[in-house]
Image: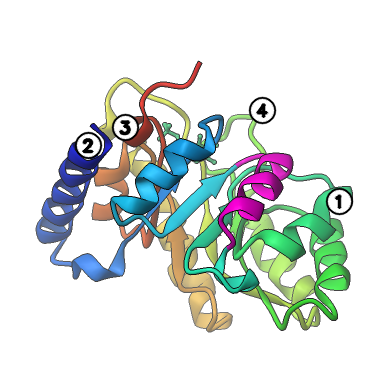
Amino acid sequence: MLRERLRKIRERIKQACERAGRDEQSVTLIAVSKTFPMSSVLEAYQAGIRHFGENRVQELNEKSKSLPGVLNDGDIYWHMIGHAQRNKAKDIASNADMMHSLDSVRLASELNKRASGLREKIPCMIQVNVSGESSKFGLQPQEVDGFLEEIQNFEHIDAIGLMTLAAPAKNPEDIRPQFTLLRALRDELGGKYGSIKNLSMGMSGDFEVAIEEGATHVRVGSLLFGSRH
Ligand SMILES: *Cc1c(COP(=O)(O)O)cnc(C)c1O
């Protein structure tokens, strides 16, 4: 049952926070509902979830029509967590309460343009590739400073933190160095860009380690909704 799975996840979040000496309220649980039907989203909503993540713009559009985010006068938050082409910027500006996968100046520029007239700011996390895998989207750690410099003048983009998708590993401990690296980068850049405060990292298999390393947003899918086919 979803309610029971949610209870267990919240308990594990609480315990990870205790181990790290952190306040439980400093961690936002994002339920990654991608590929799951609206009925699953509603079940999670009824169980108390208010943050949902989608990795495809089309699915975000459809689901946010049924259950609008705060941007569109609803009471939930839709998080766009997947790579997006520039031609999807208008949909993201229209429907995403937060964008986690900002990874190019071109996309930032288009989002900035599309947000104009629709909303004040789009809260954005910058996606960083800390795994060293060439297949992953995201900026290289050493590119992020220059990137932030370049998007400083985009008045509708609010760069609020860093996001990463860790390389899968059998043992979550093996992933810890990637999370440590992202946190160190956040600390370093946070000194120069005051708005860089958040860390979107950790999924079903590694959210506890991510929390111990400072995650403010964990993105949990299969552990909550079941396996995706
Ligand atoms: C699918 C997805 C998740 C959730 O993955 P689970 O292993 O199912 O928890 C988190 N982040 C991103 C970017 C995803 O695409």
Question: Residue drawn at (89%, 49%), measured in percent from left and top?
Answer: 87
Secondary structure beneath dot 3 equals helix
Q: Which residue is mark 4?
A: 135
Mark 3 vs mark 2: which is more N-terminal?
A: 2
Q: Position of residue 77 (x, y in %)?
A: 51, 63
Q: Which residue is mark 3?
A: 223
Comparing marks 1 and 4, which lies closer to the viewer?
1
Type of the residue with mark 1: Arg
Whether ligand 1 has any atom under 8 Å from the Cβ at mark 1 is answered as: no
Q: Residues within 10 Å of mark 2 (few under 14, many from 20)?
A: some
Please name whichever residue, 137 or 100, is drawn nearer the observer in this view of the structure.
100
Residue 55 falls in which quadrant of the image? top right
Check whether the beta carbons of the residues at disc 2 and disc 4 lie within 8 A of each other.
no
Rendered view: 92 above or below 54: below
Secondary structure beneath dot 4 equals loop
Comparing marks 2 and 1, which lies closer to the viewer?
2
Q: Between marks 3 and 2, how big is the CA–CA gap?
A: 7 Å
Comparing marks 4 and 3, which lies closer to the viewer?
3
Q: Which residue is mark 2?
A: 5
Mark 3 vs mark 1: which is more N-terminal?
A: 1
